[in-house]
Amino acid sequence: MSKVQNRVFILLIVSALTSAVPTWSQTARGSAHIVGVLAAEDGSPLVSATVVYTRLVEYLPLVSSARRPVEAPNELYVHESVIADRGGRFDIPGLPSGNYLLCVDDPMGRYLDPCKWSMPISVGGLSAAEVRDVKQIHLREGGILTIHVNDPAALLSPVDDLIVDPGIIVGVQTKAGMFYRATQKTKGQFGRDYQIAVPYDVPLGLWLFSRTVSIADEIGNKIDSAGSLRWFEMPTGVLARTVTVSVTGPL
């Protein structure tokens, strides 16, 4: 792996971790801007989508007590976000010079984040006080996969925390081994719904895991306690699909 590839790989891992822990972010210090417009494939603007931007930095080989990589001397880690306006326009102000990666989170869940399903949007060599216009960023539309989890005996914990008590982890995995966790959308006493936007005509594995309960698919096949991969594709033009699994008892 080249040095550049290694930096991008580390950056993506750190970005995934820090997105869940905002206190790791630092306040940007600089006067450069990145501006652009978020749009669908047909050119229509994406309203209120979030642009997550991260500065590529060099890290020390040691890990701090906070369990994250530490920036090398004179490096500044920036990991923040802005929301596009009604015309899809966004302005990221107050940036130090450097190289940046942009990801996009669509609040409607319909359009695909390039950082997950293609490649991050790269903004290289941003100089001090520069205003860099990345023009229009076109996002691909995907289909919404809903995973409905029946819990007739209310065995799942009311706490759905990845560290303390994960209850059930639901998501999809690519052929390359990348895992993307589905977002919990609804939660009731006897069931939950998880959703994730996925690309069309791409083989994906439905992955479910629990260390507290047994799970079965819609035809009653038990899902192994080490997790399960059931390969499927979202056909082009299918706006939504629902898969149902059930909690059948405690482990």
Image: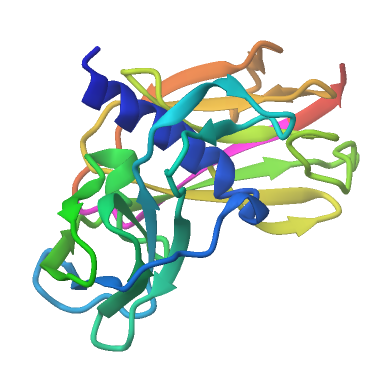
Q: Main secondary structure of the magenta part?
A: strand
Q: Report the number of discs.
A: 0
**Residue stretch in magenta:** 237-246
Residue 154 is situated, as x and y percent measured from the top left of the image, at 89, 43
Q: Is residue 105 above or below residue 99?
A: below
Q: Is residue 243 above or below residue 98?
A: above
From the viewer's side, name the closer residue of 61 and 80: 61
Residue 125 is situated, as x and y percent measured from the top left of the image, at 16, 51
From the viewer's side, name the closer residue of 152 and 96: 96
**Which part of the image, by quadrant, shows the N terminus?**
top left
Q: Residue at x 49, y 18 (%)?
A: 229
Residue 4 is situated, as x and y percent measured from the top left of the image, at 23, 26
Q: Residue at x 33, y 51 (%)?
A: 113
199 relative position to 74: left or right: left
Q: Is residue 231 above or below residue 114?
A: above
212 relative position to 168: left or right: right
67 relative position to 137: left or right: right
In the rendered image, residue 245 lying in the magenta stretch gets the answer yes
Is residue 216 among what the camera can see? yes
187 relative position to 58: left or right: right
Is residue 181 among what the camera can see? no
**Which part of the image, by quadrant, shows the C terminus?**
top right
Q: Is residue 65 above or below residue 91?
A: above
Q: Residue at x 73, y 42 (%)?
A: 150
